[in-house]
Image (cartoon, rainbow, N blue to C red):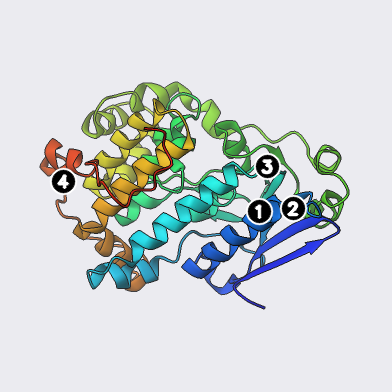
Amino acid sequence: MGDVVLRVERGLGRITLNRPRTLNALTPEMVREIYAVLGEWASDSGVRGVLIDGAGERGLCAGGDIRGIYEHARAGQDGPKTFWREEYLLNHRISEFPKPYVAVMDGIVMGGGVGVSGHGSVRIVTERSIVGMPEVGIGFLPDVGGTYLLSRAPGELGTHAALTAARLTGADAIHMGLADHYVRSERLPKLVEAVADGFEDAVREYAEEPPASQLAEERRWIDPCYSADSVEEIAHRLRTSGEAAGEAAAKELLAKSPLSLKVTLKALRVAKVLDGLGECLDLEYRVACALLAKPDLVEGIRAAIIDKDRNPRWSPDRLEEVDRSSVDRCFAWLGEGELGLAVR
């Protein structure tokens, strides 16, 4: 059994991410295998649709294999650029897949896990789902189409989720447009069996009304706080909101990479007015390549998964020290080598 298990069962193309010890983190080889098989299944009349899930009990996917990114980035190598390019092209292929693409978003679904699920046509969450884009915590930005999804969430919920690396429940994910259906985890095995017989009927039979989204109720303070034009002003509004949750959000936000926070806010604002996922992925690739050369990405990964001291030393370490020109340079046109998904 490989790191990704591919097979066709009763006309259903099955993709199972199979690295449970690493919470099914995506490697370059896994991305290439999935990309290739989706190309084959798209034109195969014997495949009526696709279902993706994760091996083990912990979740679909915790994201990309950032340990590998750390090693390449620390050595000044371009391996991450190749990985991101191939991963983003996979995200785009999923969004344009001509048949039903069912993503079982049970358990932890972070970063790259959102990329292989959130652009599908049928996205299922459960009471165990924990969905998020935590990239600002490692000196990066929400990628894999995260700027597209989060910038189109109701109000400023996407800005809140991006800048604080908030962990979303299944109900929150549905409310924010990152998922479609709520199915109790105990019913997933029967749902998967039923999907092979009929996609729409299976979802109708097993889905139920999700619980209330807590984030939806908190828009009363989230929207006015995160509608500001700068991260400094957002942090100020959160600290003075009079809401305990707002003050806690400010604390979470201010612990993240100052450069990543400012780059992410700009990326979300730009993505909101772009035409579609392809343009957002182009934007993300450009910014990702720029951040690869910054010290915060290596330092963020070091603190999170290498030394695990949870004490990153950001450079610069204060929002006020991140000048506008350094943010703008992260969005500079790369020329040759961009994804080329957008219509220019």
Q: Residues within 10 Å of mark 3 (few under 14, many from 20)?
A: some
Can residue 133 be spotted in the picture?
yes
Identify the residue at image location x=22%, y=69%.
Answer: 76
Total numbered badges shown on the rendered structure? 4
Tag 2 secondary structure: helix
Disc 3 target residue: 98
Identify the residue at image location x=22%, y=46%.
Answer: 259
Disc 1 target residue: 106
Q: Say what amino acid the circle numbered 2 marks.
A: Ser
> Mark 3, mark 1: which one is toward the viewer?
3
Cα separation between marks 2 and 1: 7 Å
Disc 4 target residue: 318
Q: Residues within 10 Å of mark 4 (few under 14, many from 20)?
A: some
Cα separation between marks 2 and 3: 27 Å
Give the image location of residue 19, x and y in percent.
58, 71
Can residue 323 be spotted in the picture?
no
